Image (tube, helix red, strand yellow):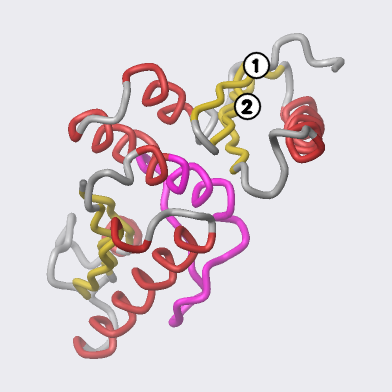
Amino acid sequence: SGFPWMGLKLRGQVATLTGTAPSADAKAAAFSAGAAAIAAHPQGGPGVLVVDGISVEGGERGVGEALVQLSDSGARLDTCQRAFTDTMAGRNIQFESGNARISPVSARLLDAVTGVAKLCSGFVIEIGGHTDSRGADDFNLRLSQERADAVRAYLVGKGVPEESLLSVGYGETRPIDPALTAEAYEKNRRTEFKV
């Protein structure tokens, strides 16, 4: 395929492309080629979720890296929680300001958590929406619920069973950092997954 460093981890209907690319451009080309090959394969097609687990040499880690470890270790409560925690570490699902529309930049992250949710669908997974403290309390509570619902709808749309997903909006009631700074606001605006 021209990408000897790329691998594939397949478990159920979740295909994770793996490996370490020599550059971001090589990663982009490999991911496109790999996703196209899976879509064209007789056992692939639209029912298979393709997740980006490719890292860049000396650069970013693949967002689906934790999914590969989960595939190896199996779906238990602790391994599922670890996979969500590791996938979300240092990352956040982005929304348009002041509403629940998911930003397209979050597609690969959402696909990675969708993969974890698919492999862990034997458990109930809570999607918790959190806002920062700016704005009215009631608006923030409603916004956090709408954002948690939007993430749930995305996962369901990609084949995660509805009954395994619960969405809860916490508004500004559970801040990680109580400071009134841009950094604190960014930390507090988050989506969390609890198995």
Whether residue 184 can be seen here: no
Residue at 24% x, 38% y: name it: 81
Callouts 2 and 1 close, C-beta under 8 Å: yes
Please tell me whether residue 112 is drawn above or below residue 110 in the rendered image: above
Residue at 78% x, 32% y: name it: 41
**Label 2 is placed on what type of residue?**
Leu
Q: Can you give x and y, in whole percent of width and height, for residue 117 in the image?
A: 38, 46
Query: Can you say which quadrant of the picture contains the N terminus?
Result: top right
In this picture, residue 87 sits left or right of residue 176: right
Q: What label does residue 17 carry, if any?
A: 2
Residue at 37% x, 43% y: name it: 88
- Most foreground residue, 17 or 163: 163
In the rendered image, residue 26 lying in the magenta stretch gets the answer no
Q: Which residue is mark 1?
A: 7
In this picture, residue 129 sits left or right of residue 58: left
- Most foreground residue, 116 or 57: 116
Question: Element at badge 1?
Answer: strand
Please tell me whether residue 28 is drawn above or below residue 54 in the rendered image: below
Characterize the local packing of mark 1: few (<14), some (14-19) or many (20 or more) Cα atoms within 10 angstroms. some
Magenta segment, which residues? 88-115
**Label 1 is placed on what type of residue?**
Gly
- Most foreground residue, 1 or 170: 1
